Image (cartoon, grey):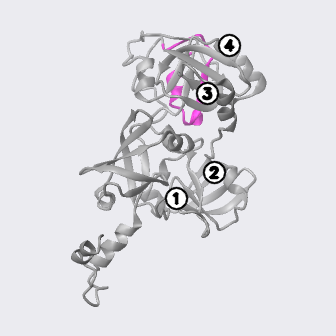
């Protein structure tokens, strides 16, 4: 299948698709290593980036389960001159192409990677788009490429005995940010304790680390960021407080025409409040539940949501923060008050709710 790489400076490179056929927009960087491509793919410092391998032959010794730098790959795209169709090494467990497909990493081969490296070396890293579309408008593609930016990236994490301080690089949310303001980081409400023109810092208590997936963040990790909604703003989703109920795991990611389906396993204390066609926040993103089973649920995401949030970069096996609909918790509390709080018989019953259309 034909693939095309378009850089923000207008350069266009044509080649053949490898790995996933999904379109990708990301920051393009280069690496001149002759070996170690698996380590590069799984290095968190390349999170969200597309990597151009200058060396002309990549994938010749395949991949294995021992050379990963972390629990999963982090790159968005891979650009090579030639991808070896098979690995020739006694430790080889799979081909690089299969590895890319398995982890939904888009790629292109047949590109003059040395010429591409010269551009990135002389002009600096820049955004690029990788597409398998047969027909596209270069001007429209360039508009999307130049407008693309990663809103939040973890700069550093300073860990204490049971807590942590996290510094996050950001731009657009800083316009009127003040010390003490709330910022949702992957759906977790944190308080800004310091800020600079390039980002802000927040304390993360042990309760937050225990209940959420923030403990797995490190330098280079991309994050969803959202300011608290103003009282005069339009209410476009459900109530999201930023108080995470638990952590789920992405069990499957499937494309269905223009929809992307995410199946997520979740603990019982979260699933008890999850209902079909109800709402749930995944990493702070308000979504509608498509179906629910005993230990999992599914949501369908439109391409725009995947493109402007972290969901588009998620992989199978990733842990995500989950916050169920707070209204369900209040209803449960009213229907089943604890003995010490139960002063008189509640008139709010299941029969009452059913009678009045709830």
Mark 2 or 3: in front is 3
Q: CA distance from mark 1 to mark 4?
A: 47 Å
Dot 2: what SS?
strand
Nearer the observer, 35 or 151: 151
- Image point 58% across, 11% down: which residue? 81
Image quarter of the C terminus: bottom left
Vertically, is 177 above or below 56? below
Check disc 4 and report the residue beneath it: 114
Q: Position of residue 203 (x, y in %)?
A: 58, 61
Vertically, is 274 above or below 305? below
Check disc 1 and report the residue beneath it: 236
Check disc 2 and report the residue beneath it: 168
Vertically, is 221 above or below 285? above
Q: Position of residue 160 (x, y in %)?
A: 55, 57
Q: Badge 3, how many Cα within 10 Å: few under 14, some, many 20+?
A: many
Residue 127 in sight from this viewpoint: no
- Image point 38% across, 17% down: which residue? 91
Q: Is residue 55 magenta?
A: yes
Give the extent of the magenta segment: 35-59
Residue 129 — which label?
A: 3
Q: CA distance from mark 1 to mark 3?
A: 30 Å
Dot 4: what SS?
helix
Q: Position of residue 269 (x, y in %)?
A: 31, 61
Reading the chain from its start, which is encountered first: label 4 or label 2?
A: 4
Reading the chain from its start, which is encountered first: label 1 or label 4?
A: 4
């Amino acid at each position: 299948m034909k693939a095309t790489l378009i850089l923000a400076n207008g350069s266009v490179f044509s080649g053949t698709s490898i790995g996933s056929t999904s379109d990708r927009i990301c920051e393009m960087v280069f690496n001149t290593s002759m070996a170690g491509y698996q380590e590069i793919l799984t290095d968190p410092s390349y999170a969200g980036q597309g990597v151009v391998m200058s060396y002309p032959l990549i994938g010749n010794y395949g991949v294995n389960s021992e050379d990963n730098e972390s629990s999963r790959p982090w790159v968005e795209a891979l650009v090579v001159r030639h991808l070896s169709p098979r690995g020739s090494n006694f430790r080889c467990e799979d081909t690089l192409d299969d590895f890319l497909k398995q982890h939904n990493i888009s790629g292109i081969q047949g590109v003059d990677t040395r010429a591409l490296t010269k551009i990135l070396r002389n002009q600096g890293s820049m955004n690029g788009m990788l597409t398998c579309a047969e027909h596209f408008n270069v001007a429209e593609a360039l508009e999307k490429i130049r407008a693309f930016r990663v809103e939040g990236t973890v700069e550093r994490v300073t860990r204490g005995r049971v807590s942590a301080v996290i510094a996050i690089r950001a731009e657009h949310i800083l316009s009127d940010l003040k010390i003490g303001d709330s910022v949702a980081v992957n759906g977790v409400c944190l308080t800004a304790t310091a800020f600079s023109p390039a980002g802000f810092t927040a304390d993360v208590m042990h309760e937050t680390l225990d209940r959420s997936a923030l403990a797995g963040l490190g330098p280079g990790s991309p994050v969803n960021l959202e300011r608290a909604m103003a009282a005069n703003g339009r209410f476009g989703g459900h109530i999201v407080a930023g108080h995470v109920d638990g952590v789920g795991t992405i069990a499957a990611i499937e494309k269905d025409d223009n929809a992307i389906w995410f199946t997520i396993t979740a603990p019982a204390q979260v699933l008890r409040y999850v209902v079909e066609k109800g709402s749930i926040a995944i990493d702070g993103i308000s979504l509608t539940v498509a179906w629910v089973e005993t230990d999992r649920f599914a949501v369908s995401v439109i391409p725009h949501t995947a493109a402007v949030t972290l969901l588009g970069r998620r992989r199978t096996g990733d842990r995500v923060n989950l916050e169920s609909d707070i209204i369900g918790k209040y209803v449960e509390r009213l229907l089943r008050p604890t003995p010490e709080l139960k002063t008189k018989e509640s008139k709010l019953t299941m029969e009452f709710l059913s009678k009045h259309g709830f």
